[in-house]
Image (cartoon, helix red, strand yellow):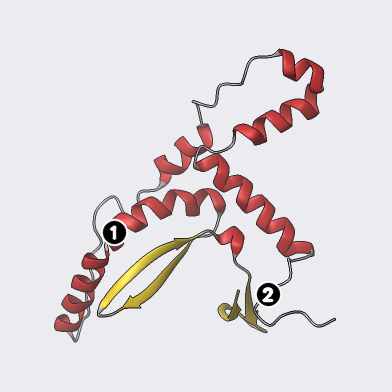
Amino acid sequence: MKAAPNIIPAPMGDDRDRMAEQSFRRRVLTGRWANDLLHTIRKAVGTERADAWRLPDTSSNPARQYCHAVSELYSRPPMVSHRTDPVAAGTVSAVLNEAGWVSRMQALQPLTVGVREGILRLDLVGERIVLREVDPSLVIAKSKTGDRSQPRRVT
């Protein structure tokens, strides 16, 4: 039976492991890790004892605190410049400012530090650029042989 052309099969092997780890890290950094903690406690002490304990406190999150503390790259708005074409640099800067690039990057950088990858999707809607963060645990990128910096296919 042939699969439908728009349906992408679930990843296997290394991609699946990477995606699971990135998804877990993202949950920790965004404060949605209570179920992960409960699961870990149940594995460590058993279901009966874990059920007898109160819900664990997730208000302290050292991983999130660390990632925010070391994310200084966009603490000041970057300057866009071009040695030979300052007008083009001004245009690019204005377009990025209109899209809210700096605030997007300030939110994305701590996640990039913790998850180890960050993806910002750029869409052209009419004459505007719209930026959208993409969860890297939902992306598979295949590169050209010999040049890992250039993706050949992004799914």
- For marks 1 and 2 on the same chain, the one whose residue lies earlier in the sequence: 2
Q: Is residue 140 left or right of residue 49?
A: left
Quarter of the rendering containing residue 50? top right
| Figure quadrant of residue 139 | bottom right
For the point 51% across and 32% down, which residue is it? 62
Q: Does residue 44 appear in this view?
A: yes
Looking at the picture, which amino acid does disc 1 mark? Val
Across and down, in percent, residue 2 comes to: 80, 83
> Where is 70 relative to 11, above or below?
above
Task: Between label 1 and label 2, give the one nearer the viewer.
Answer: 2
Whether residue 72 sits left or right of residue 47 in the image: it is left
Task: In this rendered view, identify the residue nearer to me: 101 or 149.
Answer: 101
Disc 1 is placed on an element classified as helix
> Is the N terminus in the top left, top right, bottom left or bottom right quadrant?
bottom right
Question: Mark 1 — residue?
Answer: 102
How far separated are the C-alphas under marks 1 and 2? Answer: 35 Å
In which quadrant will I find the C terminus?
bottom right
Q: Which residue: 79% across, 29% down?
A: 43
Q: Secondary structure at mark 2?
A: loop
Task: Find residue 7 and name its label.
Answer: 2
Residue at x-position 64% and y-position 78%: 6
In this view, the residue in front, 45 or 52, is 52
Residue 126's spot in the image, x, y percent?
28, 80
Few, some or many residues within 10 Å of mark 1 (<14, 14–19, 20+): some
